[in-house]
Every structure is written in structure tokens, then in C-alpha cells.
Amino acid sequence: MEFHFDCPDGQYDFWISVGVIESKTDVAGDHLGDHELVLLFTDVSLLLEAQQAAAKSAHMASLGEVATGAAHQLNQPLNIIRMSALNLGRYLVPSDQDAPKAQEKLERIHAQIDRAAEIIEGMKAFARQTDAL
């Protein structure tokens, strides 16, 4: 049986064990009284706190692994896009009338690549924090 008790000092959790002690007998084997009921209260507050902390730690570790894997998987195609945009910019001919528009589009692509890279760095930082826990 589990029992929860709130008091001004904090919160306590107890496990209650119930036992019966045989009645005493005299020399002739006659019972001298009724059985005695014994209640044993065991404070398990620290045990429950430790279990909750372990569960939270395992959950955070799982989130860190997911963040690390996602960051790695996103980083690879992002780098390919970055290299392709840089290479495409090298093929622009300044004398072409559409070159300024194309350059503007490439700059927007680079800005979005940088934004995505910042998000990935945030994921990596989160993963490092969960590893430290």
C-alpha cells in the first residue's frame, strides 16, 4: 500500500507494510491473547525522487540523440546547397542583363542557408547540453 502525505515541511511518500505477530503462548501452549497487528511505515520519498530524476535524464538523453542525428542529417544537404550556390555565382557573366537579378537571388539563398545553419548549431548546442546531464 502506498500513502502520500503533505505537510508544511514538504511532501512525503510512504510504503506501508502490514504484518501480524502471533499471540504469546504459555508453557502449556495456550494462547495468552489476540494477535497483534504491526504497521511498518517506510519513507520512500527519496527513492521516488531518484526514479523521477532518472526518467527525466533518460528522456533528455533521448532528445539529445535525436537533435544530434537531425543536425547531422540536415548539415550534409545544407553544405551541398551552399557549395552549389557558390559555384552558380561563379558562372554569372557580369555583362548579362539578368546577372544582377540572379546575384540577388543567390544572396537570398545564402541568407537562408546561414539561417538554417544557425538553427542546426542550436540543435548541436542542445545536444551538448543534454550530454552534460
Image: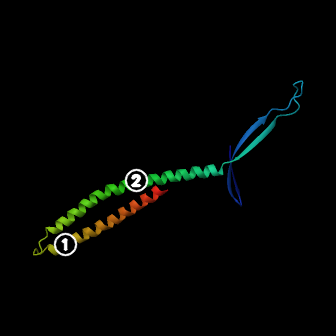
Do the residues bearing badges 1 and 2 touch, measured as CB atoms within 8 Å? no
Give the class, few, some or many, for how many residues have Cα within 10 Å of label 2's Cα (few <14, many ≥20): some
**Residue 19 x %, y %:** 75, 37
- The residue that appears at 65% across and 51% down in the rendered structure is 45
In the picture, measured across the screen, residue 82 lies left or right of residue 6, that is left
Residue furthest out toward the left:
95
- Please provide percent x and percent y for residue 73: 32, 55
Q: How many marks?
A: 2
| Res. 18 image quadrant | top right
Say what amino acid the circle numbered 1 marks: Gln
Residue in front for this viewpoint, 65 or 103: 65
Q: Residue at x 43, y 55 (%)?
A: 64
Residue 48 located left or right of residue 85? right
**Residue 97, position in %: x, y?**
11, 75
Q: Residue at x 74, y 43 (%)?
A: 40
How far is mark 1 from mark 2, CA to CA? 36 Å
In this view, 47 is above or below 111: above
For mark 1, give the secondary structure: helix
Name the residue carrying label 2: 66
Q: Amino acid at mark 2?
A: Val
Residue at point 85%, 34% (across, down): 34
Q: Is 66 drawn above or below residue 98 in the view shown?
A: above
Q: Is residue 60 left or right of residue 107?
A: right
Q: Quadrant of residue 32?
A: top right
Question: Which mark is drawn over residue 132?
Answer: none
Upstream in the sequence, badge 1 or badge 2? 2
In the rendered view of the protein, which quadrant contains the N terminus?
A: top right
Residue 103: mark: 1
